Image (spheres, rainbow, N blue to C red):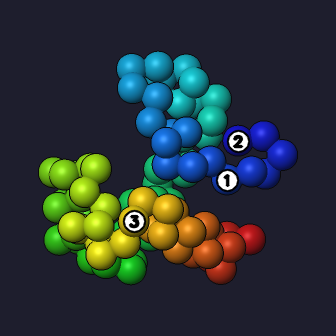
Amino acid sequence: MENNNIPRFRDLDTGDDFETFFNRNGYQYSYTIVEFIVTEFGYDKLKEFIQSPTMYLEVFGLTENQLQEKWITYLGEKYL
């Protein structure tokens, strides 16, 4: 997003609106989300999440907001 604001997961869920996704740097952020999930939880959890993308608590034991905050921390440690 603009001004170095990290988008919320919901900001990246643009459905079929690929132009908005692209304008929000969706590809770059999505890469880091996948990288984070694999690093922190492993490939099996990534696969489980792909199959049930709204089941944050069941898959990760975290709410969506908690997972978002862990990802933001990961970004700061790895990329900033």
Q: Pointers 2 and 3 in contact (CB under 8 A)?
A: no
Disc on the earlier residue, 1 or 3: 1
Nearest-to-viewer mark from 2 and 3: 3
State the image coordinates of residue 60 (x, y, percent, origin top left): 29, 72
Q: Residue at x 37, y 72 (%)?
A: 62
* Three-letter residue code for mark 1: Ile
* Three-letter residue code for mark 3: Thr
State the image coordinates of residue 73 (x, y, percent, origin top left): 61, 75
30 above or below 44? above
Q: Secondary structure at mark 3?
A: loop
20 above or below 40? above
State the image coordinates of residue 2 (x, y, percent, origin top left): 78, 40
Q: Residue at x 39, y 26 (%)?
A: 15
**Residue that label 2 marks:** 1
**Residue that label 1 marks:** 6
Which image quarter holds the C terminus?
A: bottom right
**Residue that label 3 marks:** 63
Q: Nearer the viewer, residue 12 or 30?
A: 12
User: Badge 2, how many Cα within 10 Å: few under 14, some, many 20+?
Assistant: some
* Three-letter residue code for mark 2: Met
State the image coordinates of residue 56 (x, y, percent, origin top left): 31, 61
Q: Pointers 1 and 2 in contact (CB under 8 A)?
A: yes
Q: Nearer the viewer, residue 58 or 36?
A: 58
Disc on the earlier residue, 1 or 2: 2
